[in-house]
Image: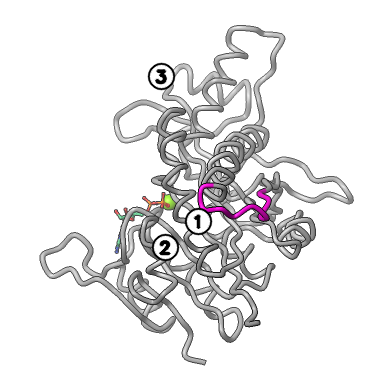
Amino acid sequence: MEKKKRIVIALGGNALGNTLPEQMTAVKITAKAIVDLIEEGCQVIVAHGNGPQVGMINNAMAALSRENPAQPNTPLSVCVAMSQAYIGYDLQNALREELLNRNIENIPVTTMITQVRVDLNDPAFQSPSKPIGHFMTEEEARAAEEQYGYVTKEDSGRGYRRVVASPKPVEIIETGAIRSLVEAGQIVIACGGGGIPVTLKDNHLKGAAAVIDKDFASELLAEELDADFLIILTAVEKAAIRYGKPDQQWLSHITTDQARRYISEGHFAPGSMLPKVEAAVKFAESKEGRTSLITLLEKAKEGIQGKTGTRISSPM
Ligand code: ADP
Ligand code: MG
């Protein structure tokens, strides 16, 4: 029998929605896309974002400590852990049902609470840029800076928000556990929200006030699991050059060299398409035979069949 293709998929915001009811509905469509890949004979590991979810949890926990002074502020790392469990629950539930609907009864689904090590010397810590949580007035922002050591910034005329660093992922602490489950034939959900950021001191892992980009964390996960494919599922079918302009051109199959040229020409928006293309290039160049694909959630199956999406491979 041909060896199964191992695929890490990275789910974007559209796979999960923005509210509890939206997520409940969205995961049904997401589960279909994932089980399509299982039916194509692939081994699937699922990573995902958590922007709206961790924002929601962070705000709820902040409200709790405002209401009850005995409840101290919840560290962002704990909020990420909570978001992994919440999203994992909805995905496990939807995947189980979709598998059973297709008479697939022998594939268990597990969510791995995943810690990802970041480096305190990462330059990102010197310039926190990622806004998270609720909006504050200037006075509230000053008070939060004093009380909690937050860094806050004015956000496009809408008020002040906390900003945190977005360092690069260095090591996935639970890789061994994830690999065991994958090799036992399970679908594993891991690295949710880019992982719980931690820093290492001696044997102690300490939660960091940071968020890791899920596209980069998924890339590292794909490398560490020796995957064949990294598939970044998002809200567009393909990446484009001159995106949104009259002479826009969708990209179907490009080499990592072409991708790098388009990156340097500024075709991909920072914070949305740029990290995807950067992660795709890194994975495709990490070892011979590795391919990256960026496509629409609903097109995952056609993407893996080579019918659509932006495929990035290295000419080596
Ligand atoms: P996700 O939640 O999946 O990470 P993002 O919103 O972060 O989604 O990134 C995907 C978005 O990137 C697309 O919906 C599109 O609007 C935007 N985008 C920016 N530049 C490009 C480009 N050059 N080609 C295609 N999409 C682009
Ligand atoms: Mg994104």
Q: What residue is pinned by disc 3? A: 137
* Position of the N terminus by quadrant: bottom right
Give the mark nearest the N terminus, 2 or 1.
Answer: 1
Which disc number belongs to residue 300? 2
Identified by mark 3, the residue type is: Thr
Element type at mark 3: loop
Asked if residue 132 is positioned above or below residue 101 in the image, the reply reads: above
Question: Magenta segment, principal secondary structure?
Answer: loop
Badge 1, how many Cα within 10 Å: few under 14, some, many 20+?
Answer: many
- Please give the range of residues in magenta: 101-109
Which disc number belongs to residue 282? none
Point 59% across, 34% down: residue: 86
Extreme front residue here? 103
User: Is 39 contained in the magenta span?
Assistant: no
Residues marked 2 and 1 touching at CB (< 8 Å): yes
Badge 3, how many Cα within 10 Å: few under 14, some, many 20+?
Answer: few
Point 42% across, 24% down: residue: 135
Residue 34 horizontal side relative to residue 195, left or right: left
Element type at mark 1: helix
- Determine the image quadrant of residue 175: bottom right
Identified by mark 1, the residue type is: Ile
Give the mark nearest the N terminus, 2 or 3.
Answer: 3
CA–CA distance in space, label 1 to label 3: 43 Å
